[in-house]
Image (cartoon, rainbow, N blue to C red):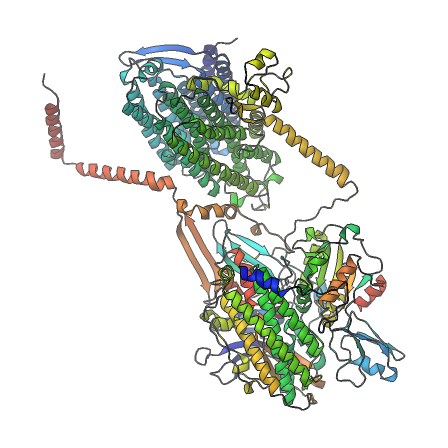
């Protein structure tokens, strides 16, 4: 039985060794280093996280003390464990993929730098997740932010605006860090030191204004890294600018760190006492989800589309957080537990399928040289394995059973429906509206990803015929395969995942959710007696007791046990769904092939195209055409402006060209980012007016400052 | 000339003489008196002529057809080629209308262009072409539309015609006048009588034959009957395109009754086999004519009622008003003809401008509208039906006894015959050679003229409006393709 | 909206009783010439026909209905006109149908109408089948826009060169069992355009034809008869394949 500290040491040792080896070895060997040691670190993280979750052990390790400030501590509790597990699960295939990417042209000469920075990022993320006091946390956070910036800016994969994106990333990260730091300070105002344990015990004494202050500062401060709506302007640019090897880590690991920050402060250190903060979280989450998916549906750059989709998924996770916070505040611990489980599950799922999709997009970009969906098409013929793995990622992100996205989104929506148990009308209305918003998001997500998969991989090839497109590299395929299997497994076996995530949510909610979500088998009479009769009956009807003596764990049905009025509130089983689905498909195939059409010939003919002599790729639907209705309906949000609308004619009547181009500015950029930037520039210019180089003026400023200081300070 | 005398461009007639080309640009209009022909000649070896499309845009398709058929190049025309002879079927330089054309060899040595691509005018990210046809839904003629769009609206439409090209003009060369009349009636049989009439008048002009008055009057009666029936059919098409089922059935009833009426009066539902050079092939008894008139008046009453009902159906009007607008200037530029032109304010009717077959003796109005949208074109159909019955009444009351055919002595020469067909003005240029055989037969049909402008009507409207706009134009592909 | 409902109800039923009973209204059919014994006048009469539909042997004139284009020159403007019969049941089926449609298709089929260069009249007569007078839906005949759902391919026109590829493609795209009905003189023999270098001499040059409906244009009742023959609900005269093919290739 391993102790957590061993595993943590192993993790950091692997990262450290990797860094040293990268520096020591000559360029060209780093790929191996990355594969071996990066994967080793990831495995250590996975095992560590699992261990912590399974045992519920809380491990604290003081490091060294900074007098007057705090004791730098490490602390691993189930919440950290959950995030460490997710991080490890993503880092494993990401390391494999990144090492494959290192062999490309775009990296020549810089493999060393990249590997060092990447492994350092692993280490800094790990440190954030196991930090036990605010100072260590913030230090590690800073290091991570700067590493993110460096990794984005040093991309050499063509001009994707990485320099501008990097600056924006850095600026917003710093602003977020400052806000979060202020939030921590506010939180630790009455505490003896900045260690989390101390802060937690003193936090309950905070007044209402202070609570709101902490909430807003940390929610939007950490929300920058997570990509919540008012502060997400950097995300779509950074994802596009980031090198292909780094983008999955950006989406699957650093994004979660922002969510960790929000959870740590607002659900663990300072649990919600009023509904207000939870409701605000709900609303912000819903808006993020809606805006994210709207922009994803209408964007034709694969990476930008995935970036917007990340904003959407973060929105859904945050909605889960909000629901949890509301239920904690209104004293419904079990529901809060379900909400947090749903949110953590969705975060886990998002990391997995988003990384998978990024691998796929990276493969497409390297093979075809373009990320524009309107120029792709028919790739399934040349990249069938990539297409298959990408399809699994698409089905997962569109929340279709039997994949993992379905389980977490279904759970989130069910949690929203549980607002019926709240007493406040206002809260119920907010829940209802946000639930409706999530439903709309889900529908748009299906549209978006149908468009992405169909227009890129199916249909006719729009690429230049000369270009040879081949299957993705073996490492890419391996990393995609790992994640695809995980997506499937997490979808079909939710009853094993929920008890695993449960300790983390119990820590936040105060009650165990898996007791009600995945109730144990009961065969004996006394087991029956302890439960309401109605529930027992429905439990059996739902087939929840199937496999009682055979299957490990608690069965295959996820259900929510209610009270006497409503013994089973909701239930589903993706495992059964998979069986039924497969069974139906097989049965249909058997009936059609072996019975109905046994005497018939099957003819293969060209697609019907109206009788044209040749159906050309330009005569097939484009991604822009497919998503045009969405663009038109939500025109008020997009507000496209016409850049060009000209007609070129010859001899007055013969038109030879009609040129039209529209562009649009992101809603958040229009409403938030651009005004803030304008204000900042105005302020800077105003200040600059004071700096005109005349030394006399500066002396006057210094004198004035001294006067003020003397006036303000009490003379004692 | 087009501006000063308010002329319309009728057509370009290209003839390959023994040693020289003769290009004939025909114009007609009130200001000019009647006809103005501009002749251009050049030796056979020299095949390049200046293009007139900058001043007379309506000549565009005529020049393109001449280039495909004769190999005559028009300098300054921006887009020659791939018109009648599709580039993905025929190579350049086939020239089927030339005297020395060897059909067997040409069919045998074809070199289609397999890399043919449609011209893309729209340059917008994500634009694509929606192909419709040549076989598209419903009971429709074969024509290929290429609609450039980004998804909702049609930004630009282009039409690929001549899938139904039967080379009638080539086929007619060397045939007798009777065989030529057969071709004239059969190539666009929904308006067979009008085309046959134009052809006969052309031949009668060449041979200097005066058609007897009874024959002229009966020709008018039959032409108006055909107009009534064709308009009823067009109204039925428009109602069908907007999916107003009961109105479609009502109009369908009227069209079938008019077809049966035509069959009862003449023996054939489409009025085949009545015309002959010099008059009519057979006489129609007076009581039959009166009976026909009575039934036509009854049908007109029901047409009027249908119009009234349609004018208060708001869902129908929503779909047909303000769609497919052709402004008056466009109608002038393209020299449009028929109800389409008159609905846009270009008032041209050959029965009034260049009266033939005794139309000058009858009182009738030439209705017109100004909006140029689908509803205006529909109103035109109803208004013209009323005028047709009015003419028929006058014909029947004033019918005199007499012979219906005069013998024709064929001689060489060339002349233009014309008629106002239900779809618009049609011009048949007939040149007779030795032994009364046809040396050159050029047909300019109203559909050819009006198809030219159709792409403008379809632009900027949604896909759902496209079939409605098509129905309101009442265009015939067979008439265009010949 | 209600005005249309009442209008429709008040119009009543106008549908023809065919095929239960013969339709005798005036103007429903142009009729067809009928041959006979004309003795010495026969060659003159035969010479009147512009498409070669008449033939004579020892004064007995025979009519090839597939070539008749209803120019009426054999009955008008002539001293000894041919006889004329006001019939409309003209369809003939190939002696050995290429494919039996079978019992399931007897009561209802889906028809794909393809215009391979027709003049407009045949197509217009096919359109009349949907008007209240004929209402082919009551007989189970439906028009479909796609060959994938079609059982019967109805072709009008002499098959112009530039439509030939599309027609072949359409036929290939139809699943089996399928039948081809060629409607109109052009579709059977090229009609008035048989000599054109860009027209085939009818559909038989391109596709195997199962039912032939002559006429120029055949009235809706004749087309209806042809459809009923195609599904086996009406008997018809048979053509030997070589008799039919040979006639088309002249």
In the foreground, B237 or C190: B237
Q: Is residue B103 left or right of residue B298?
A: right
Q: Is residue B275 left or right of residue A484?
A: right
On the question of residue B31 being in view, the answer is: yes
Counting labels gives 0
In the foreground, B31 or B228: B228
In the foreground, C36 or B353: C36
Q: Is residue A369 left or right of residue A140?
A: right
Residue at position x 51%, y 41% in the image: A370
Residue C51 is situated, as x and y percent measured from the top left of the image, at: 76, 74
Q: Is residue A622 above or below residue B238?
A: above
Residue situated furthest right in the rendering: C58
Q: Is residue B175 above or below residue A432?
A: below
Q: Is residue A69 left or right of residue A649?
A: left
Residue B471 is situated, as x and y percent measured from the top left of the image, at: 57, 64
Q: Is residue A709 above or below residue C123?
A: above
Residue A639 is situated, as x and y percent measured from the top left of the image, at: 39, 47
Q: Quadrant of residue A199?
A: top left
On the question of residue B276 being in view, the answer is: no
Residue B204 is situated, as x and y percent measured from the top left of the image, at: 64, 86
Residue at position x 51%, y 18% in the image: A515
Residue at position x 53%, y 36% in the image: A366
Q: Is residue A114 above or below residue B296?
A: above
Q: Quadrant of the C terminus of chain C?
A: bottom right
């Amino acid at each position: 039985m391993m102790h957590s500290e061993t595993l943590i040491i192993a993790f950091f040792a692997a990262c450290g060794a990797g860094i040293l080896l990268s520096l020591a070895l000559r360029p060209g060997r780093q790929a191996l280093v990355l594969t071996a040691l990066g994967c080793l670190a990831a495995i250590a993280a996975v095992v560590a996280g699992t261990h912590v979750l399974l045992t519920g052990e809380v491990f604290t390790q003081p490091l060294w003390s900074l007098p007057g400030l705090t004791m730098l501590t490490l602390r691993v509790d189930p919440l950290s464990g959950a995030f460490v597990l997710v991080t490890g699960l993503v880092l494993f295939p990401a390391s494999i993929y990144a090492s494959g990417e290192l062999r490309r042209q775009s990296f020549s000469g810089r493999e060393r730098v990249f590997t060092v920075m990447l492994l350092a990022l692993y280490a800094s993320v790990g440190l954030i997740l196991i930090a036990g006091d605010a100072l260590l946390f913030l230090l590690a956070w800073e290091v991570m932010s700067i590493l993110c910036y460096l990794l984005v800016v040093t991309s050499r994969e063509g001009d994707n605006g990485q320099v501008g994106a990097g600056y924006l990333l850095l600026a917003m990260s710093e602003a977020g860090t400052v806000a979060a730091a202020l939030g921590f300070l506010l939180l630790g105002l009455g505490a003896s030191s900045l260690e989390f344990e101390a802060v937690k015990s003193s936090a309950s004494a905070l007044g209402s204004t202070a609570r709101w202050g902490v909430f807003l500062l940390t929610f939007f401060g950490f929300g920058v890294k997570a990509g919540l709506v008012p502060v997400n302007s950097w995300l779509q640019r950074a994802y596009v600018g980031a090198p292909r090897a780094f983008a999955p880590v950006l989406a699957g690991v650093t994004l979660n760190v922002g969510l960790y920050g929000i959870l740590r402060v607002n659900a663990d250190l300072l649990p919600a006492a009023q509904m207000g903060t939870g409701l605000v979280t709900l609303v912000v989450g819903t808006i993020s989800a809606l805006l994210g998916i709207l922009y994803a549906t209408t964007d034709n750059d694969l990476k930008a589309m995935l970036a917007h989709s990340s904003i959407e998924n973060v929105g859904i996770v945050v909605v889960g957080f909000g629901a949890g916070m509301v239920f904690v505040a209104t004293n419904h611990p079990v529901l809060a537990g379900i909400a947090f489980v749903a949110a953590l599950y969705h975060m886990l799922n998002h990391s997995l399928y988003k990384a998978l999709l990024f691998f796929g997009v990276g493969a497409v970009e390297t093979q075809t040289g373009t990320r524009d969906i309107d120029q792709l098409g028919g790739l399934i013929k040349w990249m069938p394995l990539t297409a298959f793995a990408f399809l699994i990622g698409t089905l997962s992100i569109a929340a279709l059973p039997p994949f993992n996205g379905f389980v977490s989104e279904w759970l989130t929506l069910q949690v929203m429906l549980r607002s019926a148990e709240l007493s406040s009308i206002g809260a119920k209305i907010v829940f209802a509206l946000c639930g409706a918003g999530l439903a709309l998001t889900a529908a748009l997500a299906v549209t978006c990803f149908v468009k992405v998969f169909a227009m890129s991989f199916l249909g006719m090839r729009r690429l230049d015929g000369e270009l040879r497109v081949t299957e993705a590299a073996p490492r890419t395929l391996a990393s995609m395969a790992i994640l695809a299997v995980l997506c499937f497994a997490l979808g079909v076996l939710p009853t094993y995942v929920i008890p695993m995530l449960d300790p983390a949510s119990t820590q936040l909610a105060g009650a165990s959710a898996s007791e009600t979500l995945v109730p144990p088998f009961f065969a004996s009479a006394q087991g029956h007696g302890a439960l309401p009769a109605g529930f027992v009956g429905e439990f059996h009807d739902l087939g929840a007791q199937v496999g009682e003596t055979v299957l490990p764990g608690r069965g295959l049905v996820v259900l929510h046990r209610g009270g006497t009025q409503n013994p089973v509130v909701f239930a589903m089983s993706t495992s059964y769904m998979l069986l039924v689905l497969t069974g139906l498909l097989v049965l249909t195939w058997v009936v059609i092939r072996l019975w109905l059409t046994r005497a018939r010939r099957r003819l293969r003919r060209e697609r019907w195209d109206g009788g044209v002599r040749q159906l050309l790729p330009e005569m097939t639907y484009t991604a822009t055409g497919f998503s045009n209705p969405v663009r038109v309906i939500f025109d008020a949000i997009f507000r496209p402006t016409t850049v060009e609308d000209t007609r070129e004619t010859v001899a007055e009547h013969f038109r030879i060209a009609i040129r039209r181009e529209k562009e649009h500015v992101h809603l958040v950029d229009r409403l938030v980012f651009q005004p803030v930037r304008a204000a900042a520039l105005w302020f800077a210019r105003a200040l600059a007016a004071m700096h005109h180089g005349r030394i006399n003026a500066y002396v006057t400023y210094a004198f004035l400052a001294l006067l003020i200081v003397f006036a303000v300070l009490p003379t004692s | 000339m087009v501006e000063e005398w308010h002329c319309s461009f009728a057509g370009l007639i290209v003839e390959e003489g023994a040693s020289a080309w003769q290009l004939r640009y025909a114009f007609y209009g009130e200001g000019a008196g009647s006809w103005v022909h501009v002749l251009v000649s050049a030796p056979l070896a020299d095949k390049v002529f200046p293009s007139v499309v900058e001043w007379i845009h309506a000549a565009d398709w005529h020049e393109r057809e001449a280039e495909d058929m004769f190999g005559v190049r028009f300098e300054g025309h921006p887009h020659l080629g791939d018109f009648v002879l599709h580039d993905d079927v025929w190579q350049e330089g086939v020239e089927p209308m030339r005297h020395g054309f060897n059909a067997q060899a040409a069919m045998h040595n074809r070199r289609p262009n397999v890399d043919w691509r449609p011209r893309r005018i729209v340059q917008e990210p994500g634009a694509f072409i929606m192909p419709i046809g040549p076989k598209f839904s419903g009971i429709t003629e074969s024509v290929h539309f290429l609609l450039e769009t980004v998804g909702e609206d049609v930004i630009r439409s282009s039409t690929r015609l001549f899938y139904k090209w039967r080379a009638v003009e080539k086929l007619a060369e060397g045939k007798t006048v009777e065989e030529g009349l057969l071709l004239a009636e059969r190539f666009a049989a929904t308006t067979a009588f009008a085309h046959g009439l134009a052809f006969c008048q052309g031949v009668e002009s060449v041979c200097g034959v005066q058609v007897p008055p009874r024959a002229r009057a009966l020709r008018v009666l039959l032409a108006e009957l055909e107009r009534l029936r064709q308009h009823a059919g067009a109204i039925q098409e428009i109602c069908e395109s907007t999916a107003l089922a009961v109105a479609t059935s009502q109009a369908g009833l009227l069209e079938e009754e008019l077809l049966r009426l035509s069959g009862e009066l003449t023996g054939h539902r489409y009025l085949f086999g009545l015309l002959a050079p010099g008059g009519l092939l057979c006489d129609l008894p007076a009581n039959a004519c009166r009976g026909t008139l009575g039934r036509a008046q009854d049908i007109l009453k029901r047409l009027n009622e249908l119009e009234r009902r349609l004018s208060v159906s708001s869902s129908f009007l929503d779909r047909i008003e303000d769609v497919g607008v052709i402004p008056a200037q466009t109608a002038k530029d393209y020299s449009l003809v028929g109800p389409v032109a008159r609905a846009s304010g270009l008032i041209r009717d050959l029965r009034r401008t260049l009266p033939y077959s005794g139309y000058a003796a009858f009182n009738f109005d030439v209705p017109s509208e100004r909006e140029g949208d689908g509803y205006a074109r529909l109103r035109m159909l109803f208004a013209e039906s009323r005028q047709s019955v009015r003419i028929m009444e006058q014909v029947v009351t004033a019918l005199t006894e007499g012979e219906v055919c005069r013998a024709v002595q064929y001689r060489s020469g060339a002349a233009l015959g014309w008629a106002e067909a239900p779809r618009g003005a049609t011009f048949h240029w007939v040149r007779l050679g030795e032994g009364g055989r046809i040396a050159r037969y050029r047909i300019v049909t109203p559909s050819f003229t009006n198809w030219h402008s159709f792409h403008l009507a379809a632009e900027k409207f949604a896909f759902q409006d496209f079939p409605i706009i098509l129905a309101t134009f009442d265009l015939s592909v067979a008439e265009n393709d010949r | 909206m209600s005005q249309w409902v009442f209008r429709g109800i008040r119009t009543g039923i106008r549908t023809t009783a065919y095929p239960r009973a013969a339709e005798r209204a005036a103007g429903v059919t142009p009729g067809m010439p009928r041959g006979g014994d004309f003795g010495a006048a026969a060659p003159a009469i035969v010479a009147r026909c512009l498409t070669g539909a008449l033939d004579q042997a020892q004064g007995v004139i025979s009519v090839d209905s597939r070539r008749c284009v209803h120019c009426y020159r054999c009955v008008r403007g002539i001293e000894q006109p041919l006889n004329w019969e006001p019939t409309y049941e003209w369809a003939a089926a190939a002696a050995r149908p290429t494919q039996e449609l079978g019992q399931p298709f007897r009561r209802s089929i889906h028809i794909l109408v393809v215009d391979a260069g027709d003049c407009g009249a045949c197509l217009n007569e096919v359109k009349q089948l949907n008007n209240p007078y004929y209402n082919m839906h009551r007989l189970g005949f439906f028009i479909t826009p796609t060959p994938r759902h079609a059982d019967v391919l109805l072709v009008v026109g002499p098959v112009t060169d530039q439509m030939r590829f599309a027609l072949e493609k359409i036929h290939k795209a139809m699943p089996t069992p399928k039948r081809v009905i060629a409607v109109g003189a052009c579709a059977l023999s090229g009609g008035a355009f048989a000599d054109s270098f860009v027209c085939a001499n009818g559909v038989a040059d391109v596709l195997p034809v199962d039912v032939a409906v002559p006429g120029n244009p055949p009235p809706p009742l004749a087309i209806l008869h042809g459809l009923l023959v195609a599904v086996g609900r009406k008997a018809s005269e048979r053509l030997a394949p070589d008799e039919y093919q040979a006639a088309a290739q002249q």
